Image (tube, rainbow, N blue to C red):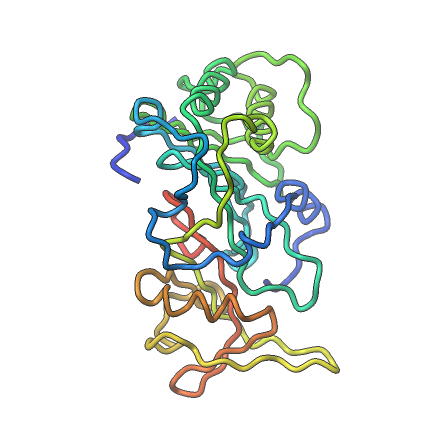
Amino acid sequence: MTTRSLTGVRKPALSLAASILAAVFVAGCVSPAATGAGAGSSSAPGQTDQPGATPTAASTEGFYLRVWQSQALAPQYTFSWLPAVTIADGHYINGMVAIPMIYPGPLYVGLSSSPISSAGIDAIVAEARADGLLGAKSDFSKGLLPGAISAHIELVVGGVTHELEGLLPTGPSPATVTPGTPEAFDAFWTKLSSLDIWLADDLGPSAPYQPTSVAVMLTKPTDAPSGMTAQIKPWPLSITFAKFGSAAGPNRCGVVTGADLAALLPVVQAGNALTRFTDSTGASMSLNVRVLVPGEAGPCA
């Protein structure tokens, strides 16, 4: 376990087994509102102006949670792996979204956000404590096999960060577990990954998550299948492709924020997986675009 003070906060295929595990992890539904999330809200990121499970400062101050998976692959292969659950500033950001089964699929998929009550946050902390996950032990992996997918939980309670790791659970958790064991980690992970069910009464209305940053990966232009024509759109940022971000394998990857994000979001929301972008030099690229959540370093690191 590491501790610190909280100061704020596509193309070679994976193996079939890894793809199945990833699909199980990210299973969920995308609401129309989430898919069309954009910039321009007057609220803080992820917040809504709707009444609901309004958190209190006493329970939410300094609390942070992020749940995600990783695998020892180059960044371009795991670029789209979103954190399944993020709780920051009293709001639950749901990253378990499913891409609509259409072709070409959307270029941008938005997330949703719901306020979470202080009772809901208290329940998460109580469960972590009961499972023996807030102590000195942080590795619950039982040893990683080559190609295995790791499960990660970052939990900040009382100013202390608990960085937990295990194997990605692939089956139901036993009815009872011994605290501080890999089985206890699995049980906690399973509850977090079904937070909408576990803490349904502690969540307020869902609304589109308003990102303050997105990661963009520039890739070789995607070829349109026979009978289809790729959209051609101008690259909305002043920086050219050659200078954007940094190298990520054969591609380039960078983070877009501020005024650039406001210019980029409407364009990528109107695009699809076959859309090509042309910069001021005439260079043409395809994009992969992914929302970044609070506290996340991002897939370009």
Quadrant of res 88: top left
- Which quadrant of the rendered structure holds the N terminus? top left
- Which quadrant of the rendered structure holds the C terminus? bottom left
From this view, report whether residue 20 is shown above or below residue 77. Answer: above
Quadrant of res 40: bottom left
Which is nearer the eye, 277 or 182? 277
Q: Residue at x 59, y 64 (%)?
A: 106
Which is nearer the eye, 52 or 247? 52
- Image coordinates for residue 178, horizontal then vertical, percent: 58, 12
- Image coordinates for residue 287, horizontal then vertical, percent: 51, 69
Q: In the picture provided, is 297 more to the left or to the right than 173? A: left
Q: How many marks?
A: 0
Quadrant of res 87: top left
Can you see residue 229?
yes
Farthest residue, direction bottom? 282
From this view, report whether residue 102 is shown above or below residue 230. Answer: above
- Image coordinates for residue 288, horizontal then vertical, percent: 52, 64
Farthest residue, direction front? 51
- Image coordinates for residue 174, horizontal then vertical, percent: 68, 18
Which is nearer the eye, 71 or 172? 172
Can you see residue 2?
no
Q: Residue at x 64, y 78 (%)?
A: 223
From this view, report whether residue 270 is shown above or below residue 226. Answer: above
Q: Residue at x 70, y 30 (%)?
A: 171
Q: Residue at x 41, y 45 (%)?
A: 46
